[in-house]
Image (spheres, grey):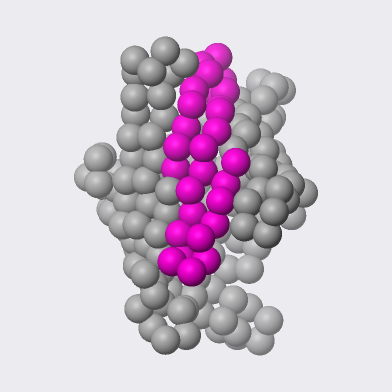
Amino acid sequence: METSLRYGGSSSNSLRIHAKEKLPIDSKTFFQVHGELDTEVGRPNYCSALVRHFYPEISASLGVGLQYDQDEKFRYTVRGKKSFPISSSGLVSLNVKGRCDSDKEFQERKGRAAAELSWSLLNFKDGQDVRLRVGYEMFEKVPYMQVRENNWTLNADINGKWNVRFDL
C-alpha cells in the first residue's frame, strides 16, 4: 500500500493522510482504490475505486471508476494519459492527460485536461532523483509546476495554489 502525508495552502489548512492500493487483474490492468483522511475533521474526505489499463506499446493508460467526496457526491470518472517521449532515454517527455467526472444521473459533468513537459533527473546527486514538470491546465487556463525529489513533492500554480506531499 502506498501512503503519503499531504498539506496544501490552497485547501483546508489541515494535514491529510492518503492511502492507495493497486490490486493486479492481469499484467496490464489493475484495480486501484484510494482514499484520504482529513485530520482536521477526523473523517475521510475522498475515496475512489478505478479499473486502470496500461498500453505500454503506446505509452498510454485509461481508467474508469467511481469516486465519493466530502460533499457526499457520488461520481463516475474516466481518465486517460498519453506520454510522448522527447529524448531517446525517455527521461524527457510531453504528457497529455484528461479526465471527466459525472454525477450519477450524468447531468453534471466536469472535465479537466492538461499538457505538461516532464524531465526526470536520475541520480541528480548520489541517491537523489529529481523530476521537474511544467504544465498547463487547459480548461482552467492555469500554468502549473511540480518538483519531486525522492519522497517529497511540491505542486504550485500561477494562481498561488500549492500543496506538498511526503510519501511514506
Name which quarter of the figure residue 35 lies in: top right
Question: Residue 84's spot in the image, x, y percent?
Answer: 36, 69
Q: Is residue 80 magenta?
A: no
Q: What residue appears at the point 63 percent right and 51 percent down from the top-left corner? A: 29
Query: Furthest residue to the left?
Result: 141
Q: Is residue 91 left or right of residue 27?
A: left
Q: What residue appears at the point 42 percent right and 54 percent down from the top-left corner? A: 81
Q: What residue appears at the point 51 percent right and 37 percent down from the top-left corner? A: 64
Q: What residue appears at the point 62 percent right and 57 percent down from the top-left corner? A: 28
Relative to 162, does residue 85 appear above or below in the rendering? Answer: below
Out of 93 and 137, give the one closest to the viewer.
93
Question: Residue 99's spot in the image, x, y percent?
Answer: 40, 40
Out of 80 and 71, give the one closest to the viewer.
80
* Quadrant the C terminus occupies: bottom right
Most frequent secondary structure within the magenta stretch: strand
Asked if residue 158 shows in the view, the reply is: no
What's drawn in magenta, residue-wise? Answer: 51-79
Q: Is residue 87 left or right of residue 50?
A: left
Question: Residue 65's spot in the image, x, y percent?
Answer: 55, 33
Relative to 89, does residue 25 appear above or below in the rendering? Answer: above
For the image shown, how many numbered marks are present on the structure? 0
Query: Furthest residue to the right?
Result: 1
Question: Residue 87's spot in the image, x, y percent?
Answer: 39, 83
Relative to 96, does residue 91 appear above or below in the rendering? Answer: below
Q: Is residue 65 magenta?
A: yes
Name which quarter of the figure residue 67 lies in: top right
Asked if residue 168 shows in the view, the reply is: yes
